[in-house]
Image (cartoon, rainbow, N blue to C red):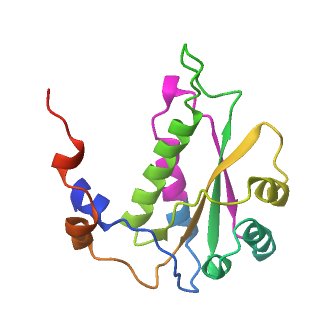
């Protein structure tokens, strides 16, 4: 499969099969984050793997959606602002670095037949308490991971995405 085919295959999954994710596949998804580029190669991310049902229930309290309660694995991707690179004007690139790492993980998951859904609209305080995170770690993304009950057709991009002409400008 080409990269573009893989990118089109990836979709946000909100319905998962009650099937455990094999450790080998989970490690491949985590490896994809490990090799992701980051500003000045500082790699300011920390990833908490939540498989325990009790911990996942506590995470559900920070994102109370019915489908989220059934996810077999949740990856909580945090940034350490003390480690992230700052541009001369003060712009913190930690969020960018996390976005790149999470994108690598979502594509690796799709390549392995797994589904993900990038979550940012969760209660950060409840998430931090559930995982007993130290103050220096800020959870930015929760990434549910599992086998999808259903996926979307790659053809959806023809009608549900902007055309290149709408966002590309040639000098």
Image quadrant holding the C terminus, namely: top left
Question: Residue 144, percent across and down?
Answer: 58, 67
Q: Residue 54: horizontal and vertical position, in percent?
A: 81, 74
Q: Which residue is located at x 39 percent, y 58 percent?
A: 107
Task: Please state if 170 lies on the left or on the right of 63 as rendered.
Answer: left
Give the residue at x 76% y 58%.
127
Does residue 119 appear to the left or right of 171 in the view shown?
right
Residue visible at 30% across and 58% down in the picture: 7
Name which residue lies at 46% across and 85% down.
149
In the image: residue 156, left or right of residue 64? left
Q: Position of residue 68 (x, y in %)?
A: 63, 75
Point out the stretch of residues depicted in magenta.
27-51
Please tell me whether residue 56 is drawn above or below residue 138 in the rendered image.
Answer: below
In front: 144, or 114?
144
Q: Position of residue 105 (x, y in %)?
A: 48, 55
Task: Give the camera-side residue of 110 and 120.
Answer: 120
Quarter in which the N terminus is drawn: bottom left
């Amino acid at each position: 499969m080409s990269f573009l085919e893989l990118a089109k295959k990836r979709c946000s999954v909100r319905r998962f099969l009650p099937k455990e994710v094999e450790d080998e596949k989970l490690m491949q998804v985590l490896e994809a984050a490990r090799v992701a580029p980051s500003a000045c190669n500082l790699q300011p991310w920390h990833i908490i793997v939540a498989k325990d049902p009790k911990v996942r229930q506590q995470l559900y309290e920070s994102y109370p959606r019915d489908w989220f309660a059934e996810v077999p694995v949740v990856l909580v991707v945090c940034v350490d602002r003390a480690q992230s690179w700052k541009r001369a004007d003060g712009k913190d690139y930690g969020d960018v670095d996390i976005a790149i790492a999470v994108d690598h993980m979502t594509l690796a998951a799709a390549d392995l037949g797994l589904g993900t859904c990038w979550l940012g609209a969760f209660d950060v305080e409840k998430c931090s308490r559930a995982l007993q995170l130290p103050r220096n770690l800020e959870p930015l993304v929760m990434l549910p991971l599992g086998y999808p009950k259903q996926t979307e057709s790659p053809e959806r991009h023809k009608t549900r995405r902007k055309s290149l002409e709408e966002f590309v400008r040639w000098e």
